[in-house]
Image (cartoon, rainbow, N blue to C red):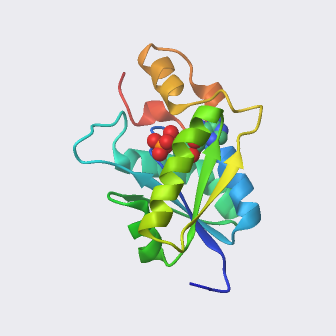
Amino acid sequence: MATDRRTAIFPGSFDPFTLGHMDVLQSALKLFDKIYVAVGYNHLKQGFLSPQTRVRLIEDAVRPLVEAGSDIEVLSYTGLTVDLCREKGTDFIVRGLRTTTDFELESVIAQANRKMCPDTVTVFIPASHVYSFISSTVVRDVIVNGGDAAPFLPANISISDYIKV
Ligand code: ADP
């Protein structure tokens, strides 16, 4: 599936999108002309933030990059990431790696995706040591316990605009 412009999907729960995700996205933009940041959700699994809110927060977070010329599209999807790849006409999936545990989980998912769709290539981007300790789980815990999650989040997003804790 060769096209002139290299595009990739960066899928995740992004519940919420953190500085760690932002760092992976910025690295991915060095490799690809366009990135689809894809909020994956499951109808049966209630998240912390709704998929729509997650999309809006990511749009806020990436606005400075878009204004500076980066081609980023934020969307939500349900179902298989390989189906989203087919829909968007890309073979590339970007994922971030923090730990060996991430690697073990991610390599299994990458192999399953490749089995389902042989053209799929998963590109792993190592976490920056500055952000590798950040996870959406920690951010959610900080927020629900009344702490300040700002140090873990992109500068221009405000989760308190969207949730009442
Ligand atoms: P999922 O539920 O699909 O794992 P997440 O939103 O937790 O979705 O993570 C999306 C991707 O971002 C995953 O590849 C994850 O390993 C990566 N990631 C999460 N936090 C960080 C971080 N601090 N640094 C680098 N990559 C990260």
Q: Position of residue 33 (x, y in %)?
A: 69, 72
Q: Position of residue 84 (x, y in %)?
A: 42, 68
- In this rendering, the answer to whether 90 lies above or below 114 is below
Q: Residue at x 63, y 46 (%)?
A: 96
Q: Relative to 95, is 64 on the left or the right?
A: right
Please name whichever residue, 40 or 103, is drawn nearer the observer in this view of the structure. 103
Q: Relative to 73, is 76 on the left or the right?
A: left
Q: Residue at x 66, y 26 (%)?
A: 133
- Quadrant of picture, ligand 1: top right
- In this rendering, the answer to whether 54 lies above or below 82 is above
Residue 14 visible? The answer is no
Q: Quadrant of the N terminus?
A: bottom right
Quarter of the figure with residue 54? top left
- In this rendering, the answer to whether 154 lies above or below 148 is below
Quarter of the figure with residue 130? top right
- In this rendering, the answer to whether 17 lies above or below 135 is below
Residue 162 visible? The answer is yes
Q: Position of residue 47 (x, y in %)?
A: 33, 37
Q: Residue at x 58, y 33 (%)?
A: 101
Please name whichever residue, 39 or 164, is drawn nearer the observer in this view of the structure. 39
Q: Position of residue 122 (x, y in %)?
A: 59, 60
Q: Residue at x 44, y 75 (%)?
A: 86
Q: Quadrant of the C terminus?
A: top left
